[in-house]
């Protein structure tokens, strides 16, 4: 078994091969049969991976190709907060330190209503109707 990366891999493979410990997070676990069907997509070999953990919405506010698009509203919120130390501290308190766990973070960013608006259209691999510009909070 190996780890399948759908879409662009950037430096993921090289970083995994250089790391002492690799924990792969994924949107879903798939069968070994599914991985064997397209072996060329299994880019991180088994010997390099210590753990595989399913974490739905784990890349948020960024995107996972064919699963969900990036969250421009959340990225804008972070960008604006990072303009000052106080703003960044408030942001971190609300979305990082103040969240009990990943579920708490997902609720803080808008819950399932917000997240479902980011779900990728299978035809495109991203959400073509997502408003990406001129955002209001």
Image: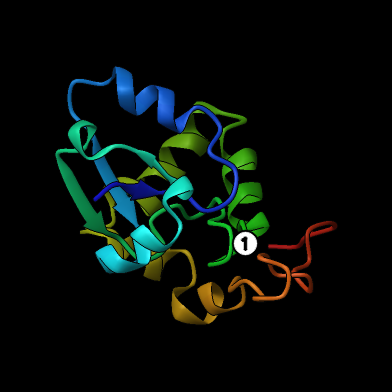
- At horizontal 75% and vertical 62% (from top left) the residue drawn is 136
Location of residue 8 by image quarter: top right
Q: Nearer the viewer, residue 127 or 75?
A: 127
Q: x%, y% of residue 91? A: 46, 45
- At horizontal 43% and vertical 44% (from top left) the residue drawn is 90
Specify whether residue 69 is in view: yes
Location of residue 55 by image quarter: bottom left
* Name of the residue lying farthest toward the top: 18
Could you tell me which secondary element the residue under label 1 belongs to? Answer: loop
Q: x%, y% of residue 19? A: 26, 21
* Name of the residue lying farthest toward the bottom: 113
- At horizontal 68% and vertical 65% (from top left) the residue drawn is 126
Answer with left or right where residue 68 lies relative to residue 86: right
Specify whether residue 29 is in view: no
Q: Nearer the viewer, residue 67 or 61?
A: 67
Q: x%, y% of residue 47? A: 18, 33
Answer with left or right where residue 96 lies relative to residue 64: left
Q: Quadrant of the C terminus?
A: bottom right
Neighbours of disc 1 within 10 Å: few (<14), some (14-19), many (20+) = many
Q: Nearer the viewer, residue 14 or 79?
A: 14
Q: x%, y% of residue 125? A: 66, 65
Residue holding disc 1: 69
Tell me if residue 77 comes above or below residue 18 in the rendering. below
Answer with left or right where residue 17 lies relative to residue 113: left
Tell me if residue 19 comes above or below residue 35 in the rendering. above
């Amino acid at each position: 078994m190996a780890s399948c990366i759908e879409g662009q891999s950037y430096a993921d493979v090289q970083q995994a091969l250089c790391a002492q410990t690799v924990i792969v997070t994924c949107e879903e676990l798939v069968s070994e049969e599914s991985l064997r069907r397209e072996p060329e997509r299994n880019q991180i070999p088994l010997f390099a991976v210590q753990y595989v953990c399913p974490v739905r919405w784990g890349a948020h506010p960024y995107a996972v190709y064919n699963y969900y698009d990036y969250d421009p509203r959340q990225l804008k919120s972070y960008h604006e907060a990072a303009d000052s130390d106080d703003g960044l501290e408030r942001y971190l308190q609300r979305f990082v330190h103040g969240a009990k766990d990943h579920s708490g973070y997902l609720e803080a960013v808008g819950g399932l209503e917000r997240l479902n608006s980011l779900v990728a259209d299978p035809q495109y691999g991203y959400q073509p109707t997502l408003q990406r510009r001129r955002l209001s909070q």
